[in-house]
Amino acid sequence: KHLKKYFPIKGGVFGRPVGEVKAVNDVSFEVYEGEVLGIVGESGCGKSTTGKALLRLTEPSDGEVLFEGRDVTKMSSEEMRKMRRDMQMIFQDPYASLNPRHNVGKILGEPLLVHGIGDKKDRAEKVKEILEIVGLSGDHASRYPHQFSGGQRQRIGIARALIVRPKLIVCDEPVSALDVSVQSQILNLMEDLQEEFKLTYIFIAHDLSVVKHISHRIGVMYLGKMVELSSKDNLYREPLHPYTQSLMSAVPEPDPDLKKERIILEGDVPSPSNPPSGCPFHTRCPKVMDMCKTDVPEFREIRDSHFAACHLYNEEEPAGQQIK
Ligand code: SF4
Ligand code: MG
């Protein structure tokens, strides 16, 4: 709720901050147990920072993160350590996130050790078991990360998150560093695991086509804000926000009857250290109106469970309350 993450821009005298990057700028959303919530947006829109702030891998500047009713942002480090058993993260770059000097057995055994799960023998068994669950061999425990392909390394990253049997996994662009040929294998694996272990995913991607299959609902971010959020079906059937409409127009459509006009946005994404007044999208929006330059559109429920932040829908009766 009202999650914010501002980074100071250093560079003044004695390294004093000269401004702030509003990486996540008042974002509110819910994630339901057992669902996959996709979050999409261009690089720099704040989607990864949002994911990390939920787990306090980066400290939120403001706002609440309620997990099963408890505010994660107010937890002590000991409470947080326990909480991490329920909330895990899979990172974009499996190369950078696995310690090259540790073998896979040690990499995967470490989270068990941290959470005091099992004795040495139990841990070795759990490592073997999880390797097989992610489609590797139990014998791989003695190997090192460099002995694996990119796709296999991401399987290890997935195993490391899964081994403590979390409830929620934040998946930060888990396939975007991989060859296109292995992306769908990893996506299929993640989808199977989500169903088998009744996991909840927040699945971050820069591309709608990656989250389309796996997600139940999709949120779209732009310049540190959530601009639209709805079920996947409604988002594809009728994207409300002009930014989502432009992203949607870039998704290849195999059916020629459904081919839509490609909406090319003018200009670059403005700097999050100096976001535009009013609607943050107004400098690039094909449907911009005068009021968009001065008035910040409220992120609210416009149709049933379909949220958007856009003045085009001001005339419509709100379907419900905004997330307060
Ligand atoms: Fe475009 Fe205005 Fe809607 Fe922003 S509020 S997305 S500028 S129409
Ligand atoms: Mg990122």
Image (tube, rainbow, N blue to C red):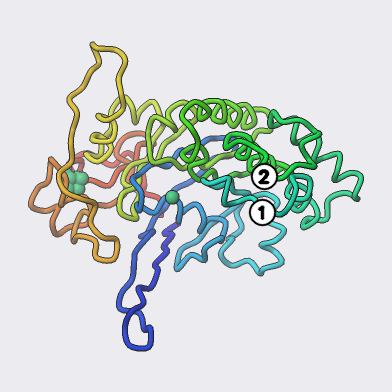
Mark closer to the chain start, 1 or 2: 1
Query: What percent of the width, then of the height, locates residue 158?
Result: 64, 40
Query: What percent of the width, then of the height, locates residue 301?
Result: 33, 42
Q: Is residue 195 left or right of residue 254?
A: right
Amino acid under label 1?
Asn
Q: Which residue is mark 1?
A: 99
Kindly indicate the quadrant of the structure image that contains residue 231.
top left
Please tell me whether mark 1 sits on a helix, a strand or a loop: loop
Camera-nearest residue between 181 and 225: 181
Q: Which residue is mark 2?
A: 145
Which residue is drawn at the image coordinates 25% and 15% (left, top)?
A: 258
Marking on residue 108:
none
Which residue is drawn at the image coordinates 56% and 26% (left, top)?
A: 185
- Ligand 2: does it lie within 8 Å of the C-beta at label 1? no
Q: Is residue 53 left or right of residue 4?
A: right
Please tell me whether mark 2 sits on a helix, a strand or a loop: helix
Q: How far separated are the C-alphas under marks 1 and 2? A: 8 Å
Camera-nearest residue between 198 and 112: 112
